[in-house]
Amino acid sequence: MTESTLSSRDIALSEESTNTTNKLAFWNFFIAFAAFALALPMGAYQVLERSGMVPAIENAAVYYASTSTHGVLMAYVLSTFFIMGFGYHTAVHSLKQKLWSPTFAWAGFWIAAIGVVLAAIPLLTGHASVLYTFYPPEIAHPSFYIGAALLVVGSWFWCIDMVVSTVTWKRANPGKPVPLVMYGTVLNAMLWLWTSIGVASEVLFQLIPVSMGWADSLDPGLSRVLFSETLHAIVYFWLFPCYLVMYAILPKEAGGKLFSDEIARVAFVMLFIFSVPIGMHHLYMDPIVAAGWKLLHMFGTFMVAVPTLITGFTIIATLEIAGRLRGGKGLFGWLKTLDYQNPVVLASVFSLLMLTVGGWGGVINASYSLNALVHNTQWVPGHFHLIYGGTTIIMYFAAAYWLWPKITGHQLFSNKLVITQLWLWFVGMWITTIPWHYLGIIGQPRRVDTLQAYQQSEELVRSWDFSMLIMNFGALTLLVSGLLFVYILFMTSRQPMVSDSERVVSYSEAIHPPLQVPHLLNSLSFWNWAMLIYLVASYGYPVLQFWFIGTPESPAWGY
Amino acid sequence: MKELPEEEQKKILESSPKGTWVIMFIYGVLFTLGFLYFWFELFVARGPVK
């Protein structure tokens, strides 16, 4: 049985099941994009404030509250709710079965949503200005940590729903390959279950007790190691759905077929396994972890570049096939015949282009020696904005444009505006992040609201001026693009209804749809065992050492 | 856009993505040059921390 036969098999989903999934997807997306809309102006404000070119808005307290809120909303709320909404929709439409438990899914949604409200209140009132990476021994209001914990717990409900749905399908379809898009989704759910253990442990056993006054001190070294277990794999949690759109939706939208189903599965399992034991490349400059462990994590980080390269190759090959099927000739003629008026095609091309520089920058960060050159400089925000804000978010836009008519039933508002919005985001992201990369190389620190402290070195500060001016234009372009995105979604809700046929969800086929796939490329349990072993090997001792050595604790400070 | 004959479509689907290989090769070269520039011109050239 092939995936193509599965998708064409007439297994009608009940109307009730489809409506429930559409509602779940809609409300998850609603919170995701509401968070985006709230965080977006804060980002623009921070750029303007930091540039020092608008003295009237300079205020350290507001800057750090805004930076913390922007980070939490964009990195945790937007991503988590988007991934959950996309996952519920994918599970039902790719497996052609009803959701395992809608009640369970709604419970997870409400727990996460309440968590967001609890975290947002101290963030917006300046009682949680600890940045999105927490940075103990800085301590925020307990409500912030409780809210963050609830957001994570709510997302675990989604993970369980994805795993149970897939296992149920596998039992009902023995020996058949799980549809590619669902295989990636369930691996991402398992990845999040494993990787969120780090941040959950830090919040539950260190930050909440101290913020509640139950403990007087904590070990910041242990916190940083635990957080690192989550910190880098979370990037792949964010990226996974982007790759899924590229593998499962783009080929059809581009007018072709996926280059290879099996290669995609190899990339997925590699992403799953290699994305976790790499977090210590964030700790290269910290004395709390021995050099050998950092070296191990450096190799792990290089390994995770491999599935990204595989994805790059497979998706470009898929686009080449589509371009040739549309009449493109010669070595690069197919690039001209691609349908750049299709939001999914355009966003995918932009996403890959941003990934080229973002991926290269990631390898610089991962290199033990070179990291010293850019550590804690403005290069780092440049890198993660290009990867997350650029490569990832532009695919979230594309997914939303593809899904919105299907889940709301309304026609997408103005394809011309959609294309304009994507172009503005692409251009704005470069104008913002290239100066940041450059500023980092010439020594500008990150995480400071004002550069007044560096005035004793006038020549150094003057060398930053031009890049600081340019980044303002980038930030404002991104602001316009982001607001346009929200406007388009809002206006779509006022458009006429689409026909039923336009609401049918179907995924792309591979050139050679697999009759069977090797067991390991369809397995869940094997990779979970592999993950457990890899995780214990790479994090077991570095975490336990804090008890062996008895490192000194630090009193909490801040709130 | 006019649809290609079935035979030609099949040929395209079965052919090697030559353009993609060239793009990946160019990217690999640029990637390596960028890394080497970073290493020799920005890192090593600045010397030890004073």
Image: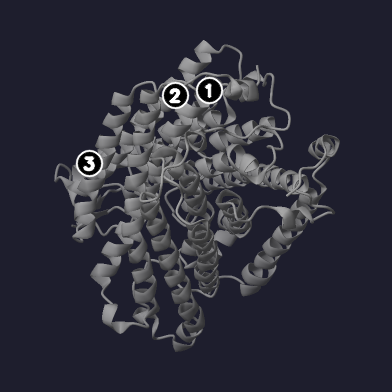
In the depicted structure, whether residue A466 falls above or below residue A409: below
Q: Which residue is mark 2?
A: A163
x then y, percent, for residue A355:
60, 55
Q: Which residue is mark 1?
A: A524
Q: Chain of mark 1?
A: A
Q: Which residue is mark 3?
A: A114
Identify which amino acid the numbered label 2 is placed on.
Val
In the depicted structure, whether residue A418 falls above or below residue A150: below
Question: Is A96 or A492 nearer to us in this picture?
Answer: A492
Q: Chain of mark 3?
A: A
Q: Residue at x 71, y 37 (%)?
A: A259
Q: Residue at x 62, y 22 (%)?
A: A520
Question: Which of the image's four quarters has the C terminus of chain A?
Answer: bottom left
x then y, percent, for residue A71:
36, 56
Q: Residue at x 53, y 22 (%)?
A: A524
Question: Alpha-carbon distance for marks 2 and 1?
Answer: 9 Å
Q: Are marks 2 and 1 in contact (CB under 8 Å)?
A: yes
x then y, percent, for residue A243:
57, 42
The secondary structure type at the circle numbered 3 is helix
